[in-house]
Image: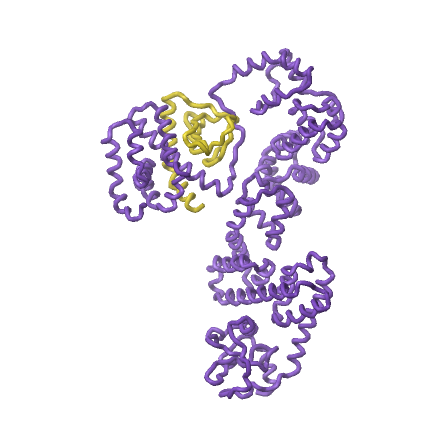
């Protein structure tokens, strides 16, 4: 179970926050943003212990739309949570 | 009223009544303050109206602490009403004061003086003790007893004890009065107010043991009591958070600090809250095990039993305990107890599980650090094993740790036998694997980033030779590795609240960025470029030390926009507009302006309506 907001340390030594998780064709994809350098992001397939980066433009487009839908749904909740913190 | 009648009346008196007040030269006085001061009268000042219905004892306390002034010479003034006020004090009352003073003094002599120096020289401790036990005895009476005890050398710090006692006593009395003033039927509704009062009293320095008595005096029913207590701990959360954020101490020292700071609170609840707010790295539960071993044991038992009933694996049980941050050896010992109680974990499963658990534990890192130091200091195998045994880990586990740290200058050949292992299994398997004698079914430990350094450090010439032989095969393995894959080293689920806010704002920013990317995809921009735009947009959002932090709390309208318009892009534009970054974003988008304008037009109305609130 991957939760939005988890912080992952990857083998590159950097920490990333899980922004969104979506399922496409039975596979789980994650959108990660580096916690320090926000220009660094990773879109990848979650393989348990590893993350497979996605470069395929078609899949990437599908994923971006999916991530957007996921965030569209969860954003008000996140902002409310943020305001409560 | 005869003297006897007056004494009886006073003894039965609980609250101040109108009839207790007298007027002297136009001023209002209370003619009977308590059974202790029957002959005295007090200037009520503006107080009489509020005083009606308040316990006499409380009225007296207020008089002592300045809310009312004691009338200096009441007998010199003409008494307009009730001349009986000057009646001589009956002896039984004085006797009562003396009796109380004597009982306080005796208590100090018999119970406090024999305590160890640390306690009896601690004015807060002594004052708390006296306030709680003699809360029905007036402060001056207690003060007299303290003075006497100090004069006889039974106590020290006289003035500090008196000051603390005065503060505690006054505060407690005021608090009880204030809380009792809530109508009983509203108590439940005012749980939050009650708990806030308690919290403020606590912040003002009133020991929690006093607060507990105060709560008891309110005679709340158990449900309300629990709610008040629980709400009180909610008020304490910022203190816990601050404590967790500012502490750099670890282990027992931190445990000590917690006890020192929160020791007069319910530590079970303190730990429960600390667990909620602390960074997992603080390993609050390992401290919990130090400070409240019995509670921690029962907590662990419950978790294990619960997991056992759900037919989960031991590994899951361990994982949960890891997440809670309990200490390794403590958990192990408890698991042994649980096994004795009939927990269904099999030996093999158990070992496998705790090996997995230990492997990632802070203690195992500590052991590795120790091994490195031992190598530097060139300690003998016996010395190393003697130290390792103190960690109370199974020998086989220690041996496996050695397996994973073969690059150190340690007497491995002597160490393994001392740990019940005849030979270095991993070394042999590596060798066999290099020679192709073992098929790929053997699962080697995962490759870690540090492994390269460890391999470089291998000092043994024999090993170096072997490494040289192994090298070609290892390189082949490297080539086979998929470059698009990146290992996830660790995942943190529970975050300190300070981090949470930053992360939430980052997610919000990323959401804006992604919606920007999606929009650029719609404009047929290559999705790879779109994703890069998205990252750039996130950077915009987060520029200036997460400017979003300033935006979000101030803009409920952003939520309104997001929900009513239904797109994160709307939020994006709203944000960028308010931050004058719209042009920058539009430049980043390489597509026709008109489409963007269409989108932004939809925002005009709410934006203008709410313009006054948007900074």
B310 left or right of A22 in image: right
B119 left or right of B284 in image: right
Residue at 44% over, 29% down: A30
> At which x and y percent is residue B569?
32, 35
> At which x and y percent is residue B557?
33, 45
Residue at 56% over, 74% down: B60
For the C terminus of chain B, give its image quadrant. top left
Residue B349 visible in the snapshot: no
B129 left or right of B524 in image: right
Q: Is residue A49 above or below residue B302?
A: above
Q: Is residue B50 above or below residue B514?
A: below
Residue at 64% over, 32% down: B364
Which quadrant of the view contains residue B244?
A: top right
Tell which of B542 and A22 is nearer to you.
Answer: B542
Question: According to the image, what is the colour scheme of the structure?
Answer: by chain
B149 left or right of B187 in image: right
Tell which of B158 and B182 is nearer to you.
Answer: B158
Residue B72 visible in the snapshot: yes
> At which x and y percent is residue B135?
61, 67
> Exactly how many numbered labels are in the figure?
0
Q: Is residue B463 above or below residue B170?
A: above
Q: Is residue B190 above or below residue B396?
A: below
Which quadrant of the view contains residue B38?
A: bottom right
The colour with which the image depicts chain B is purple
The colour with which the image depicts chain A is yellow
> At which x and y percent is residue B333?
69, 39
For the N terminus of chain B, give its image quadrant. bottom right
Tell which of B108 and A63 is nearer to you.
Answer: B108
């Amino acid at each position: 179970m991957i939760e939005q907001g988890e912080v992952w340390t990857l083998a590159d030594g950097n920490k990333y926050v899980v922004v969104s998780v979506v399922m496409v064709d039975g596979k789980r994809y994650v959108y990660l943003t580096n916690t320090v350098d926000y220009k660094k992001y990773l879109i990848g397939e979650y393989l348990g212990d590893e993350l497979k980066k996605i470069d395929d433009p078609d899949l990437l487009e599908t994923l971006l739309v999916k991530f957007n839908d996921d965030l569209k749904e969860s954003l008000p909740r996140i902002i409310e949570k943020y305001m409560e913190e | 009223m005869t003297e006897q009648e007056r004494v009886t009346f006073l003894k039965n008196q609980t609250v101040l009544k109108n009839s207790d007040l007298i007027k002297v030269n136009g001023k209002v006085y209370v003619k009977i303050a308590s059974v202790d001061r029957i002959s005295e009268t007090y200037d009520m000042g503006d107080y009489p109206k509020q005083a009606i219905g308040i316990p006499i004892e409380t009225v007296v306390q207020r008089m002592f602490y300045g809310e009312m002034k004691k009338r200096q010479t009441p007998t010199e003034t003409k008494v307009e009403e009730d001349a009986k006020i000057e009646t001589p004090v009956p002896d039984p009352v004085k006797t009562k004061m003396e009796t109380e003073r004597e009982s306080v003094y005796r208590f100090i002599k018999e119970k406090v003086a024999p305590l160890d120096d640390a306690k009896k020289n601690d004015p807060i401790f002594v004052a708390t003790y006296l306030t709680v036990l003699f809360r029905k005895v007036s402060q001056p009476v207690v003060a007299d007893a303290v003075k006497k005890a100090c004069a006889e050398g039974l106590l020290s710090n006289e003035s500090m004890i008196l000051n603390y006692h005065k503060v505690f006593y006054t505060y407690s009395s005021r608090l009880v009065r204030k809380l009792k003033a809530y109508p009983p039927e509203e108590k439940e509704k005012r749980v939050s107010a009650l708990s806030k009062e308690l919290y403020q009293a606590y912040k003002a320095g009133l020991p929690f043991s006093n607060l507990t008595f105060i709560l008891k005096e309110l005679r709340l029913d158990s449900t309300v009591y629990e709610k008040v207590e629980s709400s009180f701990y909610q008020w304490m959360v910022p203190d816990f958070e601050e404590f967790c954020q500012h502490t750099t101490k670890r282990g027992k020292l931190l445990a000590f600090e917690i006890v020192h700071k929160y020791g007069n609170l319910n530590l079970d609840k303190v730990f429960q809250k600390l667990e909620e707010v602390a960074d997992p790295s603080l390993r609050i539960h390992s401290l919990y095990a130090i400070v409240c071993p019995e509670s921690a044991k029962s907590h662990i038992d419950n978790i294990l039993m619960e997991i056992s009933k759900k037919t989960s694996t031991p590994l899951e049980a361990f994982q949960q305990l890891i997440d809670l941050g309990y200490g390794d050896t403590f958990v192990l010992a408890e698991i042994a107890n649980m096994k004795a109680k009939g927990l269904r974990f099999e030996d093999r499963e158990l070992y496998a599980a705790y090996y997995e658990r230990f492997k990632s534990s802070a203690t195992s890192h500590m052991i590795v650090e120790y091994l490195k130091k031992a190598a530097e200091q060139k300690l003998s195998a016996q010395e190393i094993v003697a130290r390792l045994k103190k960690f109370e880990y199974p020998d086989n586990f220690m041996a496996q740790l050695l397996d994973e740290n073969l690059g150190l200058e340690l007497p491995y050949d002597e160490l393994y036998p001392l740990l019940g292992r005849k030979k270095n299994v991993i070394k042999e398997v590596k060798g066999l694997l290099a020679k192709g004698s073992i098929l790929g079914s053997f699962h080697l430990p995962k490759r870690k980033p540090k492994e390269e350094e460890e391999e470089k450090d291998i000092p043994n010439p024999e090993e170096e030779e072997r490494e040289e032989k192994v090298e070609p095969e290892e390189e082949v393995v490297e080539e086979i590795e998929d470059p698009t894959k990146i290992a996830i080293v660790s995942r943190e689920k529970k975050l300190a609240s300070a981090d949470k806010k930053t992360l939430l704002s980052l997610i919000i920013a990323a959401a804006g960025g992604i919606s920007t990317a999606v929009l650029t995809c719609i404009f047929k921009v290559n999705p790879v470029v779109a994703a890069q735009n998205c990252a750039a947009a996130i950077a915009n959002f987060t520029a200036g030390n997460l400017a979003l932090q300033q935006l979000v709390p101030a803009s409920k309208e952003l939520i309104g926009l997001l929900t009513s318009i239904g797109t994160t892009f709307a939020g994006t534009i709203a944000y960028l507009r308010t931050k004058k970054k719209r042009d920058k974003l539009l430049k980043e988008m390489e597509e026709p302006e008109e489409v963007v304008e269409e989108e932004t037009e939809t925002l005009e109305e709410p934006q203008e309506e709410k313009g006054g609130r948007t900074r």
